[in-house]
Image (cartoon, rainbow, N blue to C red):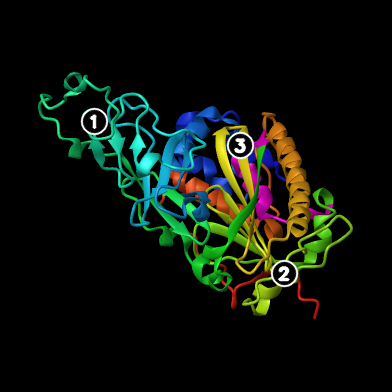
Amino acid sequence: MTTDPNSVLPARPIDPALFTDEEIYRQTRLPVELASTLIPDAYTSPEFFALEQERVFTSGWVAVGFTADVDKPGRCVVVDVAGRSVIVTRNRHGELRGFHNVCRHRATKLLDADAREVGHRGRIRCPYHNWTYDTDGTCLGTPLFEGSDVPAGEEAVFDTSVARNFDRADYGLLQVSVDEWGFLLFVNLDPGAGPLSTQLGDLPERFADYRLESWMPQRRNTYEVSANYKLVGENFMEYYHLPWVHPELNQVSKFSDHYRWQGPGMYTGMCTTPVSSNGDAGGWDGLAPLSSLSGTDADSGRFVWLFPSCAIVVLPNHAFVLLNKPVAPDRTVETAVLLTHPESPADAEGLDQLEKFWDLVNRQDLEIVERVQEGLSNPAYRGGRMCFRFEEPLHRFQNMVIDKMVGVDRVPAGDAVEGDMTRMFPDPA
């Protein structure tokens, strides 16, 4: 006799007060061969989304941009994390610095979202009352300070020396932890942030021979996605869907050539090896590979989802990154970036081919995840079963989300296999 799977799954909608209760995730906590998917409310509920922003996106390291965009003092990017605007820049010594994008006077937003330089002479000026800060966050002065553009003859009006118990040294910009790995910038809103290395786990070692810190962004595209950011990630983490959603990709990244590729760290990983040559619709050829790669690195595609919201694909000749910004339970803004390694020549034709192929693949993915989002809105659906062979990375990711929601501080261990790859199919030998 078969048991109705809905009999063990929570009814919908779930009381938002229970979103931090371990019990409602019981079926997803089971081993993957027995587990059901994360509760549908995690993708549709405004209350879950608001709590997730706080518990997931303000408690750890979030990939937000590229080191090449802050390659010298005064260069900056303005990013959004959990609805909070953050400035990432380098000080005059070239050190990374991060600040909440608010003036210490009356909270005016200092820089616009498209700012690429902090301002004249490396100073951040408030557009409201002209409070001025340097790239270490120090408050250099309020009006009457040199260069504050106080109208001639009106200096006395702006004299703040009579203010009591005011020392501008106490009013520097509000600091945010920032760090870098490879070509990526990270922000951590937690005042007690631990090291980025804990979250990355063994990824720096796995990618050591790629010299990712020297790779450069070449092409960027933005996509508006009518789906939860987790659906974007979960689609990226599995290849179960390739033959039906990606017939073109399936020619160069064959179903049977996929492996899990993950160790300890806040990430999921898989690889395609060997990478096949281009098909009729294109593929991953088009640029020369990095000459220093050897072994499987020279003939593999590495696919990593960095918790919570960044996808990285690294191939021998290029990289492709998706930065996903959740803006609502059913809406994500995705920035897709194509990068090349330091030996890659300026090859517009090769880049055009790669950009076209990735755009095709990405649009196919986004169309299907939007259909999943529509299905999740039906209250009759209460969750589904994992397909353990192909969906183990989803199970790993969903349990990371659950950990954050219920307050468990844990970094997943790696696969218990020799070597760095877990075969997903029986060995033909």
Q: Amino acid at mark 3?
A: Thr
Assess disc 2: are there few (<14), some (14-19) or many (≥20) residues with their C-alpha within 10 Å of its C-alpha: some
Q: How many marks?
A: 3
Q: Which mark is residue 332?
A: 3
Name above or below for residue 276 compared with residue 125. below
Q: Give how far apart the Cα atoms at labels 3 and 2 are.
A: 33 Å
Q: Amino acid at mark 1?
A: Thr
Residue in front for this viewpoint, 38 or 397: 397
Q: Secondary structure at mark 1?
A: loop
Of labels 3 and 2, the one closer to you: 2
Return the x and y of residue 369 as percentages of the image width and height: 71, 40
Assess disc 3: are there few (<14), some (14-19) or many (≥20) residues with their C-alpha within 10 Å of its C-alpha: many
Q: Secondary structure at mark 2?
A: loop
Q: Which mark is residue 288?
A: 2
Residue 279: quarter of image: bottom right
Q: Are marks 1 and 3 in contact (CB under 8 Å)?
A: no
Residue in front for this viewpoint, 298 or 428: 298
Return the x and y of residue 352 as percentages of the image width and height: 76, 53
Q: Which mark is residue 142?
A: 1
Please say whether residue 239 is visible from this viewpoint: yes
Residue 227 in the magenta stretch? The answer is: yes
Residue at far right of view: 280
Q: Is residue 258 left or right of residue 305?
A: right
Please say whether residue 410 is visible from this viewpoint: no
Q: Give how far apart the Cα atoms at labels 2 and 1 are.
A: 53 Å
Q: Earlier in the sequence, mark 2 or mark 1?
A: 1
Residue 166 in the magenta stretch? The answer is: no
Q: Amino acid at mark 2?
A: Ala
Q: Quadrant of the C terminus?
A: bottom right
